[in-house]
Image (cartoon, helix red, strand yellow):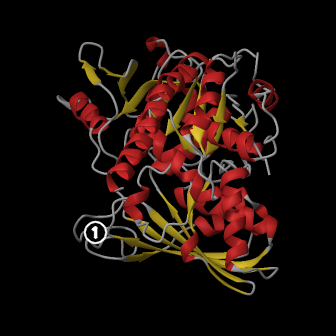
């Protein structure tokens, strides 16, 4: 009996592996040939392994209570690979579940179902032109943005990283820049190959040719001499945060727009993608992608306010230390921040609670906030203590947040976990701006406490790239959208 059980278990696993291995080349060609990115219930499969595909399918049962088998999603991947599709993000898991267990359960015509579900992209051509992108600065966020662009390298890639601009130029600088891109103590090794072109001062990564430019000021760079034109400059230095400072980028030859990876000052639009990205206009030449904390809390707050109404609240962030702090006690202009980051919890301030109103004005004046820096290198948490306009309960609130994470327009910003064992390191590399920890939710009548995780480096970088796509006029639909 035990032997038979083991054989059946092994046979089941082997079947899943075989289907996953069949999917991988089709998933790759869908992206390379059509710029179609495949996911399973929000889990992206671009550059995934067979094990990644299997694990993504397992998450469906956690959300739906019903297992989605790889043999059920395989026919959809196969059918997609034979279609002429315009660029899009397609969740094969949701389509497969809907076809087998949802509204289409009585429909046996898969081709007709897919053509209806994909009507906005099927038999359409790609009309998006590639966009040159320059990284001004190459620190924590800059290198993650580079990874995000390089992982999409190929003929269908629309955002092409053409150059990085840094200060320096000393002997060995190029090797050190490449090494920091190749190896990361938090996010692990670069997924691919990196070589250096010493003669041209460039880095080659997975087929991307990235010019390294040394400059002390934005306006002194002539990008056109490197064949770069109308580039979007992503300033991740944080040195220039107002319109005059960021406007220096637009004085350089070969640029057209600039975006800041920090809160902007003055009249600069602070964009939290998923919340106020509709405010981005084609005429905008300077934008801010706000802060990592603002990007984490605003989508969740918006969803809650629209569903329940928010009277007021307090946001406490438990934030990993950053490069702005000191390794050991030393002078720092900020209060308490001069104390050793790896040894202390450091009480400090955050402007994120007030900054929410720049992206979502309905909460202006309703939130207070503070922050505690803690001795971890990445992944932070926001604790939202809110008074709602209507009463609810833990189950109803969590069900709403789960459905928001899976099926709403905020599905790229909000993720959801029901794990009772999850800790911060489990969320390194999370692509959502926020991950709701449902097991920690506290509800008492109209008083709610939510615990929201966020990868303050990688998740934020994904939000920045979504803003850059909008600035470039690259609008890829998410399919399916809201199917409930």
Direction from residue 142 to residue 105 in the image, left or right: right
Q: Does residue 220 lie above or below 347 as drawn?
A: above
Give the camera-side residue of 469 and 436.
436
Give the camera-side residue of 401 and 196.
401
Give the camera-side residue of 276 and 479.
479
Q: Residue at x 57, y 42 (%)?
A: 69
Residue 377 drawn at (x, y percent) = 33, 60
Q: Mark 1 points at which residue?
A: 331
Numbered disc 1: secondary structure: loop
Direction from residue 432 to residue 174 in the image, left or right: left
Q: Does residue 243 lie above or below 170 as drawn?
A: below
Q: Which residue lies furthest to the front in this view?
A: 1
Q: Badge 1 local density, few (<14 within 10 Å), some, or many (20+)?
A: few
Q: Residue at x 66, y 61 (%)?
A: 402
Give the camera-side residue of 6 and 484.
6
Q: Is residue 168 visible?
A: no
The quadrant in which residue 79 appears is top right
Direction from residue 377 to residue 301 in the image, left or right: right
Residue 3 drawn at (x, y percent) = 32, 51
Q: Does residue 42 lie above or below 2 as drawn?
A: above
Residue 359 drawn at (x, y percent) = 71, 56
Q: Which residue is drawn at 29% across and 39% down?
A: 189
Direction from residue 221 to residue 203 in the image, left or right: left
Q: Which residue lies furthest to the left in this view?
A: 171
Q: Is residue 229 visible?
A: yes
Q: Residue at x 56, y 54 (%)?
A: 433
Q: In which quarter of the image is the N terminus?
A: bottom left
């Amino acid at each position: 009996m035990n032997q038979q059980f083991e054989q059946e278990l092994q046979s089941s696993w082997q079947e899943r592996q075989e289907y996953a291995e069949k999917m991988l080349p089709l998933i790759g060609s869908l992206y390379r040939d059509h710029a179609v990115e495949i996911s399973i219930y929000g889990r992206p499969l671009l550059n995934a392994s067979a094990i990644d595909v299997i694990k993504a399918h397992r998450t469906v049962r956690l959300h739906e209570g019903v297992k989605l088998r790889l043999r059920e999603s395989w026919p959809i991947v196969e059918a997609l690979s034979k279609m002429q599709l315009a660029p899009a993000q397609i969740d094969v898991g949701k389509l497969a579940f809907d076809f087998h267990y949802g509204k289409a359960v009585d429909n046996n015509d898969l081709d007709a179902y897919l053509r209806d579900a994909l009507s906005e992209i099927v038999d359409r051509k790609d009309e998006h032109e590639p966009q040159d992108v320059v990284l001004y600065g190459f620190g924590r966020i800059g290198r993650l943005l580079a990874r995000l662009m390089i992982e999409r390298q190929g003929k269908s890639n629309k955002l092409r990283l053409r150059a990085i601009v840094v200060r320096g130029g000393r002997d060995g600088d190029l090797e050190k820049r490449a090494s920091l891109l190749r190896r990361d103590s938090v996010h692990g090794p670069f997924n691919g190959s990196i070589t250096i072109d010493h003669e041209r001062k460039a880095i080659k990564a997975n087929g991307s040719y990235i010019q390294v430019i040394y400059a002390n000021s934005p306006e002194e760079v002539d990008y056109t001499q490197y064949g770069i034109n109308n580039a979007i400059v992503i300033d991740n230095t944080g040195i220039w945060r107002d319109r005059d400072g960021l406007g220096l980028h637009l004085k350089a030859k070969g640029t057209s727009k600039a975006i800041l990876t920090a809160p902007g000052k003055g009249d600069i639009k602070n964009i939290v993608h998923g919340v106020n990205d509709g405010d981005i206009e084609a005429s905008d030449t300077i934008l801010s992608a706000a802060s990592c904390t603002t990007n984490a809390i605003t989508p969740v707050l918006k969803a809650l306010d629209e569903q329940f109404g928010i009277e007021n609240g307090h946001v406490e962030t438990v934030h990993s230390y950053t490069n702005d702090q000191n390794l050991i006690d030393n002078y720092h202009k900020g209060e308490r921040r001069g104390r050793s980051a790896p040894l202390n919890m450091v009480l400090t301030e955050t402007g994120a609670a007030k900054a929410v109103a720049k992206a979502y004005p309905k909460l202006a004046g309703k939130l207070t906030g503070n922050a505690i820096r803690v001795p971890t290198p990445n992944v932070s948490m926001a604790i939202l203590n809110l008074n709602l306009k209507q009463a609810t309960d833990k189950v109803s609130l969590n069900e709403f947040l789960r459905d928001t994470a899976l099926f709403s327009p905020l599905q790229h910003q909000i993720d959801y976990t029901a794990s009772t064992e999850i800790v911060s390191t489990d969320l390194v590399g999370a692509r959502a701006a926020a991950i709701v920890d449902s097991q920690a939710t506290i509800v008492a009548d109209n008083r709610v406490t939510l615990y929201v995780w966020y990868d303050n480096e990688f998740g934020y970088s994904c939000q920045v790239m979504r803003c850059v796509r909008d600035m470039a006029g690259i609008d890829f639909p998410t399919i399916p959208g809201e199917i409930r």
